[in-house]
Amino acid sequence: MKRLLAHLDRFHVPFGVVLLATAIVCAVMVMEVDRLVFEAAVGRPLTRQASTIFAVSLVVALTLGWSTLDLVRRRAETARLRQARRHVLSAIGRGAITMAYQPIVDRAGVLKGFEALMRVRGPDGIGPPAALLADAALAGLDGPLTRAVLARVLADQDATLGQSVPITVNFSVRAIRDIDIDWLITTIAGRGLNIEVTEDAFFDDDPHILERLAMLRGAGSRLYLDDFGTGYSSLNHLVTMPIDVLKIDQSFVRQMDRSERHRNLCRAIIDLAETLDLDIVAEGIETQATFDQLVAFGCRGFQGYYIARPMSAAAAMGIIAQSAASAASGGMRTTSRNADSALETKPSARRTNRVSTNPTPGGMS
Ligand code: C2E
Ligand code: MG
Ligand code: MG
């Protein structure tokens, strides 16, 4: 038994300690129960020796079963981790990371900027980022993945998009922690790149996260608080944290048409942002009714399928060009129908796409 436990301890010390304590308790309990049952059945006392042999064999069997299960579980975890690591590194290595850009407009339909959204090239075309993001988080590779995203965004800026229109890039907390901050500041400073983080950034144990966010902000990036309302931000965080823009979570916005409570919630968030002098963007706008309601509530930034779906850099370039032409000719609005929605591979997405930088159908000039 001692050798077995020593062997197990080589794998995991706390587990060995727990096992030893459990084994002793089990042995004593089994000896007692076993003695009582035997004595009740045969009407005479069980010998101490027989009881001990029985108890020890039971405990050995339990221990072996337990440790085998634990070993199998750990092997499976290691294999899953390796697979996740391979998935992310291979996607980065073969240049499978590409970006889609979704316009953000103001109430008049004027382009305010784009959110850069990761897409992954695979054998079946270009797909959403969820699986790769989950694997990167599991394997601790958020840093390298975000570097690949930034490299793609910079390349798209150089090749087509230019730097006249702000672009926001999504960052996980771990990416902010892991990426070399000097490199990050040099990379994004002066390039009109902003940062979107979710509320968990403000709850991380690492005090350097806030420091880093403040440094990025100091270098000229605006800080967007993504999916606002779904995390655990206290109102105090909104006052003390280095935030420029709140993004109302799309789960609230998408329910506005059918739920008065959600309409009220969105209005309250917009009022809160106004009171705290923060800019505000609503994401997930899918209908004109939602858009009109948000305009009436005083929202300043609008993003969602109703306005435009995420699109390729080339298509985004078309919208920037039209926006610039529109501004030059004195009209503030841009009229644009984006034919390139190829980055959205879901068939339903293609069917319903009515990409336009003008949220008012037919109302652009
Ligand atoms: P997010 O940052 O909140 O991005 C908005 C998501 O909602 C995007 O999904 C976008 O395609 C989708 N969306 C936009 N408008 C609408 C709408 O009107 N209706 C509906 N139903 N959906 C809409 P996507 O691209 O699949 O991204 C999902 C999430 O993955 C993002 O949520 C973000 O958290 C994360 N993500 C995307 N790209 C990156 C990245 O480069 N780095 C990191 N760390 N995370 C990323
Ligand atoms: Mg986002
Ligand atoms: Mg969001």
Image (spheres, rainbow, N blue to C red):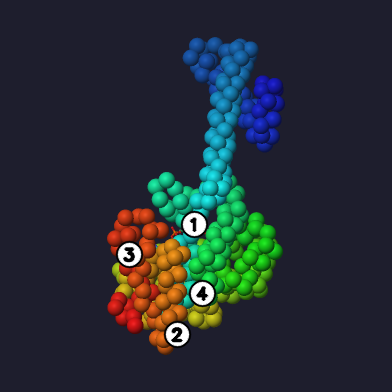
Q: Is residue 195 left or right of residue 319?
A: right
Quadrant for the N terminus in the image: top right
Q: Quadrant of residue 217?
A: bottom right
Give how far across and how far down residue 294 sits, in percent. Answer: 38, 77
Query: Residue placed at 61% from the left, 24% from the top?
Result: 27
| Number of residues whose C-alpha sits closer than 10 Å to that of mark 3, classed few (under 14), some (14–19) or many (20 or more) | many
- The amino acid sitting under disc 3 is Asn
- The amino acid sitting under disc 4 is Val
| Residue marked by disc 1 | 98
Q: Are marks 1 and 4 in contact (CB under 8 Å)?
A: no
Q: Is residue 240 visible?
A: no
Q: Is residue 37 left or right of residue 206?
A: left
| Residue marked by disc 2 | 328
| Residue marked by disc 3 | 353
- The amino acid sitting under disc 2 is Ala
Mark 3 element type: loop
Q: Nearer the viewer, residue 143 or 76?
A: 143
Q: Residue furthest front?
A: 159
Mark 2 or 1, nearer chain start? 1
Q: Quadrant of residue 180?
A: bottom right
| Residue marked by disc 4 | 165
Q: Is residue 287 left or right of residue 250?
A: left
- The amino acid sitting under disc 1 is Thr
| Number of residues whose C-alpha sits closer than 10 Å to that of mark 2, classed few (under 14), some (14–19) or many (20 or more) | few
